Image (spheres, helix red, strand yellow):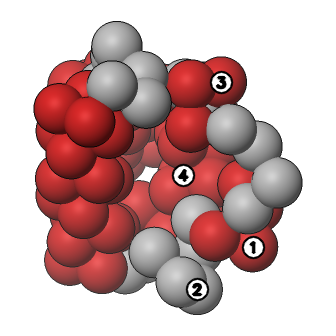
Amino acid sequence: MKKYIYPALADKPIIEINARDLTAILIAIWNTKTETANRVLYQIKQVFNWANLMGYCNHNPYEATKTALGNAKSFTSG
């Protein structure tokens, strides 16, 4: 998160962060550092779960981001 997500989204309120933002960041490492990308994606899920619980936002872009990255991986592989 510190290396990939925070530099790009540090100034954006969590309520405004969406799957498009996250996909744009993670796509760069999805095929080359898949394990790292998956770890970051899991951390994103946890952060948004907490933010929802605390009332900071009412969405979690984890599933949509995971779907978008999965489609990107199969698209670029074939």
Identify residue type, mark 2.
Lys
The reply to whether dot 4 and dot 1 touch (C-beta < 8 Å) is no
Dot 2 crowding, Cα within 10 Å, few <14, some 14–19, many 20+:
few
Residue 7 tag number:
1
State how far apart marks 4 and 1 are (Cα).
15 Å
Q: Which residue is mark 2?
A: 3
Q: Which residue is mark 4?
A: 27
State how far apart marks 4 and 2 are (Cα).
14 Å
Identify residue type, mark 4.
Ile
- Is residue 8 in sight in this rendering? yes
The residue that appears at 63% across and 54% down in the rendered structure is 25
Look at discs 3 and 2 and give the one toward the viewer.
Answer: 3
The tag earlier along the polypeptide, 4 or 3, is 3
The tag earlier along the polypeptide, 1 or 3, is 1
Q: Which residue is mark 3?
A: 16
Dot 3 crowding, Cα within 10 Å, few <14, some 14–19, many 20+:
few
